[in-house]
Image: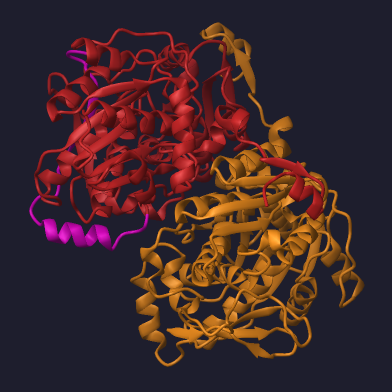
Chain colours: A red, B orange
Amino acid sequence: MSVLTASGTSIDLGPAAALSCRECGQRTALGPVFACTSCFGPLEIAYDLPVSDPEGLRRRIEAGPANIWRYAPLLPVPADVADKPNMNPGWTPLVKADRLAAELGVTGGLYVKDDSANPTHSFKDRVVANAVEAARAFGFTTLSCSSTGNLAGAVGAAAARAGLRSCVFIPHDLEQGKVVMAAVYGGDLVAIEGTYDDVNRFCSELIGDPAGEGWGFVNVNLRPYYAEGSKTLAYEICEQLGWRLPDQLVIPIASGSQLTKIDKGLKELIATGLVEDRPYRIFGAQAEGCSPVSQAFKAGHDVVRPVRPDTIAKSLAIGNPADGPYVLDIARRTGGAVEDVTDEQVVDSIKLLARTEGIFAETAGGVTLGVTRKLIASGALDPSLTTVVLNTGDGLKTLDAVAPTSGPSAVIRPNLDSFREAGLA
Amino acid sequence: MSVLTASGTSIDLGPAAALSCRECGQRTALGPVFACTSCFGPLEIAYDLPVSDPEGLRRRIEAGPANIWRYAPLLPVPADVADKPNMNPGWTPLVKADRLAAELGVTGGLYVKDDSANPTHSFKDRVVANAVEAARAFGFTTLSCSSTGNLAGAVGAAAARAGLRSCVFIPHDLEQGKVVMAAVYGGDLVAIEGTYDDVNRFCSELIGDPAGEGWGFVNVNLRPYYAEGSKTLAYEICEQLGWRLPDQLVIPIASGSQLTKIDKGLKELIATGLVEDRPYRIFGAQAEGCSPVSQAFKAGHDVVRPVRPDTIAKSLAIGNPADGPYVLDIARRTGGAVEDVTDEQVVDSIKLLARTEGIFAETAGGVTLGVTRKLIASGALDPSLTTVVLNTGDGLKTLDAVAPTSGPSAVIRPNLDSFREAGLA
């Protein structure tokens, strides 16, 4: 479906009809903008959703490709999106975690949505794939972002495959795996002496400067399109459960965008008739060393006071989370909660997930599982209900977290005597 | 389908009917054995393949899960395999690599089969998943292996999910990513002071010793079952091409088993009528620092003289490849070749693949692409034909190969002046 942009050109981003302000509801034409001109609230996509024929829509989705483009009718992308060179992320495993459930005493069904299976091994491939389509539609030839690491790799890879230039910005102190992965795709990688919040502020400056002209910053001027990619997590979880809403979801919080968009995705599934409307609870997970949303939740505040992050969960180390207030709202509205865990609990949970389910999560996954355990212990999370825990990234990218305690049980010479001496026989 | 084992118990490994010696053809009952009692040749699975209804088989496969178990009718696994806890590998992307093709001058269609998308990010998940089913059938409770790294992670993860104990053996000098990944799943990891060939010899000793009793060594006493997992690469490639054989395949060589089983898989697709019978050429790829098969091919020999490996492509560093003679036979029979490249060419090809297609391959993938380029240059590989190049592992596991030349373009302070000084605007 083609619509007119503010500049009068015609673009096709599928069912995306306009941008709408999350705060005041004012609508504006599709374009590379992210803030409402009336109230400065965040813009998100308004759709003409297909609501008339749920069975037909369901069949169309099920006949689609084994990636996020099966949901093209619900995303801001053209109908022929799957024919263009892109990373085709998504349709990652929803692992029924029976051995983990047994350890945690969860009886209602415990699932891990394992997004480390994406092309660059984090959920960021989902959002970037959507941003690439917007970049193409708006004629950008350079793809950019501020990143705590995972996004940098996802942007580098997606730009390479799409034949776009990339220039990504990261804090200078990231894990080696994330730095190398961000650089290997051949785009420009700029390390900034400062925190992620400094990097983010710098990108907002750059976007208003001639130096940044013509650049598509996936998480700034393309943010409304980009953020929609997280909805696909909600779609996939429900489809993989047999077109059914889970009772409880535990989701990590960095900017909070993923959690809010998963909620949006669940509501769209209800609105289009793809799932039956029933209550669900959303829980947010942070690391203690960067827990502004958790602190606000526990204090009963509606605003989130920025913090200076200090945690091994660097992909969640956003001290000033843009969607923090919306997260608070969703957790409270659905009967969920926001909780945090220590770095020690993060490491312990990474190893628990690996030992019980063979899933090697990055620190963000350790945060989410750690919070799940804490919420079960406190009674906030009901173990008799169907629960989905998100793993958003890959342990190979945060080796330092587990390396000190994950080495060989023994080093031996290649003979049976040496093996027996090691006491492993 | 249940069949009797040599010990008289009944097991169900689907269409697997017996073991058959690759050298003399002698058949023996299914069991945890790997060498022919008559001639010591390697045993492989003999099947009752479904040959009568290709259309029905094709529909059954297409309606199956998006993992290797869609091919259960062609694998040594029970029909209900997908219901048991396992890693569900496979159905990895076959990426149409148009940007890479343009750089290499390939006009007939160039594809990268990207097996870094598997659960532990290498093709080893395919073979281990098959070995796990055999281990269950034969009642083993400990899963073991000798490994150059990727297999260790795959075994650790698969054992964790299946609830089996694991004890894996690796050379002491592997990449950190592979060591941590092998250890994190909580099984025993034993580092051996020696090369992979030393580790392999030790495991053969251990299997005959009381200390190894009741252990399923995936690549020793479960090897016939394990090796079949590689056939799924052939099945997927052809199905993803629209049930069509490619003209040319370029496959890395470690033990040579993957290449020989892909050839077996292609022949089974022809035998069952799933694809049309037409010629295909198979090319093998090695690193110059461990190129015994390539040397034999070029010298016109039928036997492979063992070497002491010295290459950054550690996952291919097997100096005494068990299936070397079969690789030579297949390359010659199909009109293919075996070639090798330097470590420098490996690194350069990793970066070329990342820059053009957004795929970050481990060193083995660099070997395969490097050899592809060399074969195009020499005229051995025809650029006007459909060509599939395998990437069998993930760049995150061999960071050291590219880290020295893959860092930030610039380190700046978070302001526009500092950005402009860096010359990237």
Q: Quadrant of residue B248?
A: bottom right
Q: Quadrant of residue A17?
A: top left
Magenta range is A37-66
Q: Residue at x 77, y 79 (%)?
A: B329
Indicate whether B229 appears above or below B120: below
Q: How many marks?
A: 0
Q: Report if residue B97 is visible in the image.
A: no
Quadrant showing the N terminus of chain B? bottom left
Residue A43 magenta-drawn?
A: yes
Q: Residue at x 28, y 63 (%)?
A: A63
Quadrant showing the C terminus of chain B? top right
Q: Residue at x 79, y 70 (%)?
A: B324
Between A104 and A241, the one nearer to me in the picture: A104
Residue B266: x and y in percent read: 58, 78
Indicate whether B195 appears above or below A26: below
Q: Is residue B21 left or right of residue A366?
A: right
Residue B129: x and y in percent read: 52, 62
Between B207 and A7, the one nearer to me in the picture: B207
Indicate whether B299 appears above or below A72: below
Residue A184: x and y in percent read: 62, 36
Residue A358: x and y in percent read: 48, 47
